Amino acid sequence: MNLLGALFQSSIGKKLLMAVTGLVLVGFVTGHLVGNLQIFLPPAKINTYGHMLESLGAGLWAIRLFLLACVAIHLWLAFKLTAENRAARPQGYGVEHTNRATLASRVMLRSGIVVLVFLVYHLGHFTLRVQHPEWSEHTFRLADNTMVRDVYRMTVQGFNSAGISCFYLLGVGLLAYHLNHGLVSMCQTLGLKNERWTTGLERASAAFCWLYFLGNAVIPLSVRGWLPVLSGLIQR
Amino acid sequence: MVSERSSKEFFAVTLRVWRQAGPSASGRFVDYPATNVSPDMSFLELLDVVNDGLTVKDEEPIAFAHDCREGICGTCSCTINGKPHGPGHGIATCQLYMRSFKDGDTIIVEPFRARAFPLVKDLVTDRSAFDRIQQAGGFISVRTGAAPDANSIPVPKDDADLAMDAATCIGCGACVAACKNASAMLFVAAKVSHLGLMPQGQPERDKRVLAMVQAMDEAGFGNCTNQYECSAVCPKLITHDFIARMNRDYVKALFKAKFKPVSSASGGAG
């Protein structure tokens, strides 16, 4: 059987692609969070970091296109698999009964769609800069006198809006919830799981998701001045 | 098992049963009151009693699948109160006793629902999709003739036990019926693992998993979303760890088939 054909057409192949693209994206959002946490350092840090990323040139585009391809495959398969799964039971039961499927596992498509909407908004805000283009005109002078985009100020200004902060919390919250099923599910799909590992994997996944959510959540909460120590680190 | 209730304490339930005259007829739920229900009756015996009453009244009895009535054939198949094989754990419908229900209960009885299991009549579905999956690779090819010496092929006890766990699958289809996506992964995983864990199953191991998964996909089952509803209702309590094993086996087989050396021999060993 054709390898690519089997990956894109067989049920297990599609699940594998779902797992692998998911893993890449988990890696990305984790790195992204670590980068974002530089907001608690002096503005020069995150602005230098942002400038470094923007100066990658072709490399940046290669990474962007690779991530975009992962999102596209993950998304396309999500809709395709869901459509197939619905078609596999044209007539449902009179009594809907759930034995042990978790809520997170049953709302994967819905949590994913909210995350997607957030992603589109976020890219529009920081990458394409079509929302609030005036915010991206702020520049910052580095120690060597180079003028770079003031990502720090864009972030603080963004979270000054209660609406953006709420949407952000909803987006990262649902992403963490999505990953709570996704991470363990990924191990099962890749065949890297059995009964002996299950409890440990579930706990590690829950811990990761909580850390991911809290790590993201402290940013808007600090910018809005709601956290005792961390809020003091933000320069307005 | 000794019932807590004495068998003299009869009670009454209402059976709400899916009635559908044929594959293309429209179906609906019909209520059948049942009195004098003994807690020691099996659920299928209650259906027998209700059917006797229907026959006496010259009505069409409820069609339901059953055979051995001792939990080993995999023929019985009702979804009872939304759960395939009913409220028990690790049992088939035929092993369900009326002591599991209370006086005045309404028990909702439906067929297994899946596109790959088309409805034949009432509670009977056609599960021959499972046979097609088995025919695609759920066997080993051996020479016929004299039986080989016992123990001529050593099998480690751990492997034999694990293979036996998978081999307990009776092919009832409850895994498909319980799955939110009507996926057959637990059944196929059990059948793939049962032979794949034995030395006798090795020569056709890769071919088997590829062919059986393809047959599964062609039959129109859904995809696995790792919610483990399947193993929760399996009358033989087969673990979903076999699904992880099949996933692994499938990927390995896929890559091995693609990258194996190409043989230069054009014919046999002439």
Image: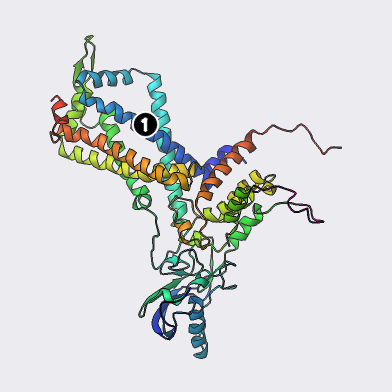
Q: Nearer the viewer, residue B231 or A29?
A: B231
Q: Is residue B36 left or right of residue A36?
A: right
| Residue at (69, 32) in percent of width and height | B261
Q: Where does the image place residue A24, in percent across and percent down from the top left?
A: 42, 33
Which residue lies under the disc numbered 1?
A28
Give me the residue at 57% from left, 54% from top. B190
Residue nearest the observer in this picture, B35 or A160: B35
> Taking the image as drawn, is residue A197 in sight?
yes
Taking the view exactly as shown, the residue that stands out farthest to the right is: B270
Seen at 40% across and 46% down, the residue is: A199
Q: Residue furthest top?
A: A144
**Closer to the camera, A108 or B170?**
B170
Q: Secondary structure at mark 1?
A: helix
Residue B160 at x, y = what percent? 62, 51
Magenta region, residue range:
B142-155
Q: In this rendering, would A163 be left or right of A66?
A: left
B96 displayed left or right of A104? right
Q: Quadrant of residue A31?
A: top left
Whether residue A175 is visible here, answered yes or no, is: no
Give how far across and how far down residue A110 sits, in percent: 33, 49
